[in-house]
Image (tube, rainbow, N blue to C red):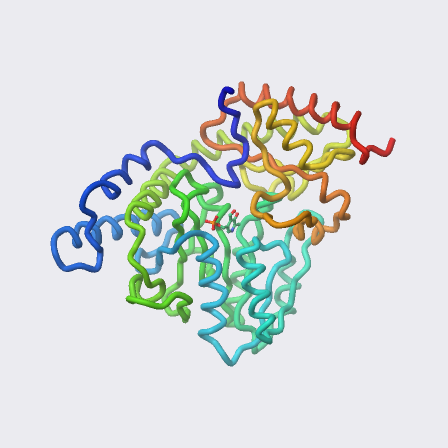
Amino acid sequence: MADSVYLDYAATSPLDGRVLEAMLPHLQGLRGNASSLHAPGAASHEAIEAARESVAALIGASPGDITFTGGGTESDNLAVLGLARANPEKRHIVVSPVEHAAVRESVRHLEQEGYEVTRLGVDGHGIVDPEELERALRPDTAFVAVMWANNEVGTVEPVEELARICIEKGVPLHADAVQAAGRVPLDVGRVPVSTLALSSHKIYGPQGVGALYVREGVKLEPVIFGGGQEKGLRSGTENLAGIAGFGAAARFAAEEFEERTRHEKELRDRIVEGVTTIPGVRLNGHPEMRLPNNVHLTVEGVESESLVLFLDALGYAIGRGSACASSGHKASPVLLAMGQGEREAFSAVRITVGKDNTSEEIDGFLEAFSRAVEQLRELSPLQTS
Ligand code: PLP
């Protein structure tokens, strides 16, 4: 069978060939331990520091404020648990209802330990209201978590405004920027977030490596203990090849930002235009404040999984409402928070494009999509009319 047309870049992206090139020297032969004093150790240390500079440059940070981790999930856990543990006298947390499970579940863990959690609302597009955030802050608020851009519906939050409110009240804001990186401009010099999570595999880098930005002066306790690598914030021998790959991926993401986002927007808008001519298909998330590569749809009368599998059989790989929602058949909390009903939430699919997709692929997809929707509606028990 021919390769499918991949339209699920929010789940993960293919490894860029140039990134693989940058990784290879660190996978073959002797790879010194970056903590060793000898020349092979020093070479590894240098490669890690070069990668740190590239990752820092992608978000306008100082290299010293970047901690490498084992991925976006670990970065989010480190921020949530680390901020809470560093301020043990503060027992209140404010969180958006549209966070990725990496934030949502670590906050739930703290809640089980006795923390009080305020979950903000969102509007029908998934946007957090800055005034509501301001009202929720208290003297005992340990931190706030609002993601930069949502992994399901693609909505980009007003993070700058939210971060300014938090800074004024002296409360740290954690922003999960895993989906935003390389797709919307990120500048921690302008936007005063305290911590920010990144993941390599969403920007054509390897899986299993990420980073947490920690603004200078922000207190954070580690969650992994050991040899004290990464200034004690993330012990464990560094994933040298992974970090080198992440560094290269971040460099290309910065260099090719304009070109990639222009291309993605073009393809995204073409998909939206095409699919929304089908009756009962509508776009979720904010119409403008959204990721350049995200199309999230409700397809009335069709069940997400059937549509994903039908399109897969036709050679198109798209996502369900969320590729990260692994266990069970639960409605997406993001869509529920946006005011959708359970039934609607089970009719959602996500199409996310990337730098290597072509207009021809999108034309083929649009044809396949309308065929799939038509046939499934003929069969589907969800169909009411
Ligand atoms: N945060 C967001 C918004 C994500 O989309 C993802 C992955 O899908 C993660 C965190 C987790 O990142 P990782 O897969 O690197 O653990």
Q: Position of residue 301 (x, y in %)?
A: 78, 34
Residue at 52% x, 61% y is: 163
Q: Say above or below: 55 vs 360.
A: below
Q: Say above or below: 245 vs 260.
A: below
Residue at 19% x, 42% y is: 29
Q: Is residue 331 left or right of residue 216?
A: right
262 or 30: nearer the viewer: 30
Q: Residue furthest left?
A: 39
Residue at 56% x, 67% y is: 109
Image quadrant in which you'd find residue 283: top right
For the C terminus, the quadrant is: top right
Give the number of marks.
0
Image quadrant in which you'd find residue 7: top right
4 or 93: nearer the viewer: 4
Q: Position of residue 93 (x, y in %)?
A: 58, 69
Q: Position of residue 143 (x, y in %)?
A: 53, 68
Q: Is residue 366 left or right of residue 51?
A: right
Q: Say above or below: 100 vs 269.
A: below
112 or 67: nearer the viewer: 112
